[in-house]
Image: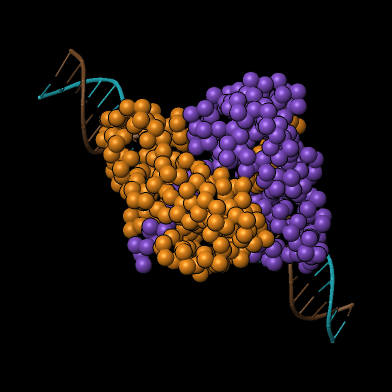
Chain colours: A purple, B orange, C cyan, D brown
Amino acid sequence: MERERICTKKSCFSFDTIKRLSLYLRNLKRLKEKGIEVISSDRIIPLLNVSSAQFRKDLSYFGEFGKRGVGYEVGRLIKELEEILGTNKEWKIALVGVGRLGQALLGFEGFSKFNIKIVCAFDIDKKKVGKVIEGVKVEDMKKLKTIIKRKRVKIALLCTPPHSAQEVSEKLVAAGIRGILNFSPLILKVPSSVFVSNVDMACELESLIFFLKRNERKV
Amino acid sequence: MERERICTKKSCFSFDTIKRLSLYLRNLKRLKEKGIEVISSDRIIPLLNVSSAQFRKDLSYFGEFGKRGVGYEVGRLIKELEEILGTNKEWKIALVGVGRLGQALLGFEGFSKFNIKIVCAFDIDKKKVGKVIEGVKVEDMKKLKTIIKRKRVKIALLCTPPHSAQEVSEKLVAAGIRGILNFSPLILKVPSSVFVSNVDMACELESLIFFLKRNERKV
DNA sequence: CTCCATTTGTTCCTGTTTTCACAAATATAT
DNA sequence: ATATATTTGTGAAAACAGGAACAAATGGAG
């Protein structure tokens, strides 16, 4: 179905390009920590699982960041990518559903590295409401709209059980949320202006199983 | 880079087809629970975010499961998909890294619905070793090879911090693991016979931010 | 029995994505 | 200076995936 594409005056590129840029950024930061200052597209690809041509082309949609015959200056490329991706300023996000997965995400170190901060959490379970987990107070679902509007949060992590995911997503949209990272195994119906990314662990595992079963047969 | 493709004597299809089959299967099960016995490709698509042509085409790689003029018999299609995906028999998997995310996965209900069972868990932290979480005893990393070999586990969930992920993946491969679902934000280097799927929450969130930033500018 | 309304399975076409391949640019060595 | 070795940025080509569209099959109504 409708494949995500992003078009600038220059050209059009796929949404996958953006995901790859995020991957590039993370690994460039690792290189910088190791003290590497310049790297060529040929030597960075072992970290990325991407071809060098793809690496260069993904970058080319946004400008010319390298130097021919030399490569890319790591520090500069990090800055450019942060600018492109928008992670040079802090992003506030909300979390709904403080179950096991929700609690794991509240403590996920990966987010803070990207200037992403969970600023509020909600649950319907009275026993959880009021608790402070990883520095975030769990609020009642009833307060969802008020708090999200006041804090001007635009992105939410949806970690509720599937039977309430659709209902919750509608509340999120009504509260002004424009992007949802959906961990519940259910396709959400939302207005086209709202962007949903699905993280579906069961599908990933099942496809892994298919691959293994297939290889077993071949052997 | 090397895009995953699967080829039969009939034809070739992308790995995404398999992920979609898994999605179809889950939603067919929901329909069955609701008591729906027959459904057409046109009426199932609202649940799937996929076109009806794609639904039919994905299935056609594996056989003819529908009846023209009628649709698909839900019960039969579930059985066929379980057969194709390999989830008609139980799959034992291992988990490495019993941190917050690891513990969340140990308690994830979604797996059991797909005949997937975590049968062993490992951590390097002495304080965690010996504990029983969700019915699974946490073992020392040193015992990883012995236990995985003895239990003949072929799939592992990798939830360690990124700095040890590569090292752990090598141990897993040496122990006979053939498929890894990698939650650490690091591209693993493994033999080509081993299949790795990456679940990268930070990349997902960053691309979401890009999208939102872009839309804000437009508005 | 015939006609009509459905719906599948599949072919063909179209637009996208990836890779190839090379000119242009840079640095280094002699 | 000049030649040589790199490496980028980018058109062009190849490989792919998705969707439109339609023949073939089915069931039901009259």
Q: Nearer the viewer, residue D23 or B130?
A: B130
Where is residue B197? Give x, y as percent: 53, 54
Quadrant where the C terminus of chain B is found in the figure: top right
Q: Is residue B73 above or below residue A209?
A: above
Where is residue B104? Give x, y as percent: 56, 44
Number of on-image labels? 0
Query: Relative to B146, is B30 on the left or the right?
Result: left
Where is residue B95? Give x, y as percent: 52, 55
Q: Is residue A163 visible?
A: yes
Write the residue at 69% across / 67% down: A43
Write the residue at 50% across / 67% down: B145
Q: Is residue C25 above or below residue B54?
A: below
Q: Is residue B157 visible?
A: no
Where is residue A189? Give x, y as percent: 53, 27
Q: Nearer the viewer, residue B143 or A175?
A: B143
Q: Nearer the viewer, residue B196 or C28?
A: B196
Write the residue at 51% across / 43% down: B107
Write the residue at 42% across / 65% down: B150
State the image quarter where residue A145 is shown.
top right
Query: Relative to B60, is B188 on the left or the right?
Result: right
Query: Relative to B18, is A178 on the left or the right?
Result: right
Quadrant where the N terminus of chain B is found in the figure: bottom right
